[in-house]
Image: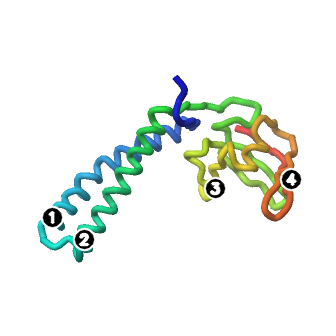
Amino acid sequence: MKKPIDVRVTKQGFQDFKDEEAALNARRPGVLARMVAAREQGDLSENAGYHAAKEELGNIDRRLRELKLNIRFADIIDGTGSDFVVLGTTVVVDNGNGPQEFKIVGKTEANPMEGKMSEASPIGKALIGKKAGDTVEVEIPDGKAKFKILKIS
């Protein structure tokens, strides 16, 4: 059977999915209780509390469905110990502005603000399969950037 979605994650990313699912499942009953209490106040057309709770419940349910799919179809990749840049490795690069550290992760757990670079991003794609000492050239919105791989861990 072919998997409906391709979810490649690190061990930490998989655990983050499970933790978020548990937190949302714990929060859901409180939101549902708020919605029921607001509904009992009568006219729903002008009941802001009801509409806010209904929207929040919808967001929680949507995210829970997403998380369940991600958890069910996850391929957990552990790249630690590799001499090459693969999913799960941390790489230190220098593009002329000083060293930067990225953890190469799957699309579903990417967050550049936290230093988590997707394997599908232009920089991630360029780094995959390379080793320390290699230099890669990446097409970015401002033109081209060169990254020298200083360290892989």
Q: Residues within 10 Å of mark 4 (few under 14, many from 20)?
A: some
Work out whether mark 2 precedes mark 1 in sequence or the reverse, and give the earlier one.
1
Residue nearer the viewer, 138 or 39 = 39
> Can you tell which quarter of the image residue 106 is in?
top right
Query: Which residue corresponds to mark 3?
Result: 112
Give the residue type that dot 3 points to.
Pro
CA separation, marks 2 and 4? Answer: 52 Å
Query: Which residue corresponds to mark 4?
Result: 146
Q: Is residue 146 left or right of residue 129?
A: right
CA separation, marks 4 and 1? Answer: 58 Å
Give the residue type that dot 4 points to.
Lys
Q: x and y percent of residue 41 in the render?
A: 13, 71
Which residue occupies 84% across, 56% down?
A: 145
Q: x and y percent of residue 94 in the render?
A: 81, 53
Query: Which residue corresponds to mark 2?
Result: 49
What secondary structure is found at the residue carrying circle 3? helix
Image height check: is 120 above or below 97? above
Query: Which residue corresponds to mark 1?
Result: 37
Image height check: is 26 above or below 132? below
